[in-house]
Image (tube, grey):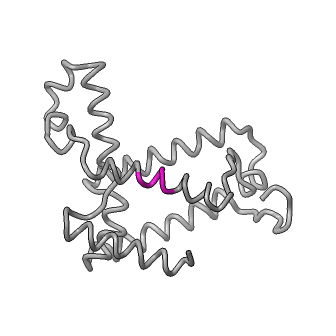
């Protein structure tokens, strides 16, 4: 599927999701999973916590199925295209960092945690604000998108200043 067709399809799915339920979002379901784990390992803490008893953080909703669909869809697309290849280190990481694979995995995990933490601290979700915001023509989506891409490019430049060789076997 060409990139433009995939983009149009994603936009139509978002419009359908807004019409049927609400804007798509994925980060809240991580909080739901955390709540379920905390209820098992520290029930006394969970009972007294004001947010962990809120229905939106205790029920596995359509967002959870959306997350499962993202993972399953990516796996099916990779299998269909015969592009399934497990990589722990990219050509960009190899070119810029003389570090073990474990450090790359830790860096990726920490980046993901920071991204989700920032989204939850802002009472939002990256997917909801970016994709949902533009779909609903929300004014807050404009500065969010500029900031997201601006800082994304800055961090990419700082973390990966050297480009990998274009035709190397590392890619």
Q: Position of residue 143 (x, y in %)?
A: 35, 74
- Compared across the picture, whether 44 is left or right of 8 comes to left
- Compared across the picture, whether 149 is left or right of 126 comes to right
- The image quarter in which residue 138 lies: bottom left
Q: Residue at x 40, y 71 (%)?
A: 10
The C terminus - image quarter: bottom right
Q: Position of residue 140 (x, y in %)?
A: 27, 73
Q: Is residue 72 magenta?
A: yes
The N terminus - image quarter: bottom right
Q: Nearer the viewer, residue 30 or 82?
A: 82
The stretch of residues the image draws in magenta is 69-73
**Whether residue 123 is situated above or below residue 39 in the rendered picture:** below
Q: Residue at x 77, y 51 (%)?
A: 94
Q: Residue at x 19, y 66 (%)?
A: 20
Q: Position of residue 110 (x, y in %)?
A: 51, 42
Q: Nearer the viewer, residue 79 or 114?
A: 79
Q: Residue at x 21, y 22 (%)?
A: 45
- Compared across the picture, whether 9 is left or right of 64 comes to right
- The image quarter in which residue 11 lies: bottom left
Q: Residue furthest right?
A: 168
Assign the magenta stretch its main secondary structure: helix
- Compared across the picture, whether 114 is left or right of 31 comes to right
**Whether residue 77 is situated above or below residue 72 in the rendered picture:** below
């Amino acid at each position: 599927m060409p990139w433009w067709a995939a983009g149009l399809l994603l936009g139509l799915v978002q419009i359908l999701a807004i019409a049927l339920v609400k804007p798509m979002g994925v980060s809240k379901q991580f909080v739901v999973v955390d709540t379920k784990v905390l209820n098992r390992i520290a029930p006394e803490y969970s009972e007294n916590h004001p947010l962990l008893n809120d229905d939106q953080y205790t029920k596995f909703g359509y967002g959870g199925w959306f997350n499962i669909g993202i993972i399953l869809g990516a796996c099916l697309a990779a299998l269909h295209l015969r592009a399934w290849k497990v990589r722990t280190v990219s050509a960009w990481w190899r070119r810029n960092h003389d570090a073990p694979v474990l450090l790359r995995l830790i860096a990726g995990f920490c980046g993901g945690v920071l991204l989700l933490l920032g989204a939850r601290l802002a009472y939002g979700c990256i997917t909801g604000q970016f994709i949902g915001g533009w779909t609903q023509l929300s004014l807050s989506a404009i500065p969010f998108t500029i900031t997201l891409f601006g800082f994304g490019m800055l961090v990419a430049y700082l973390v990966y200043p050297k480009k990998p060789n274009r035709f190397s076997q590392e890619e």
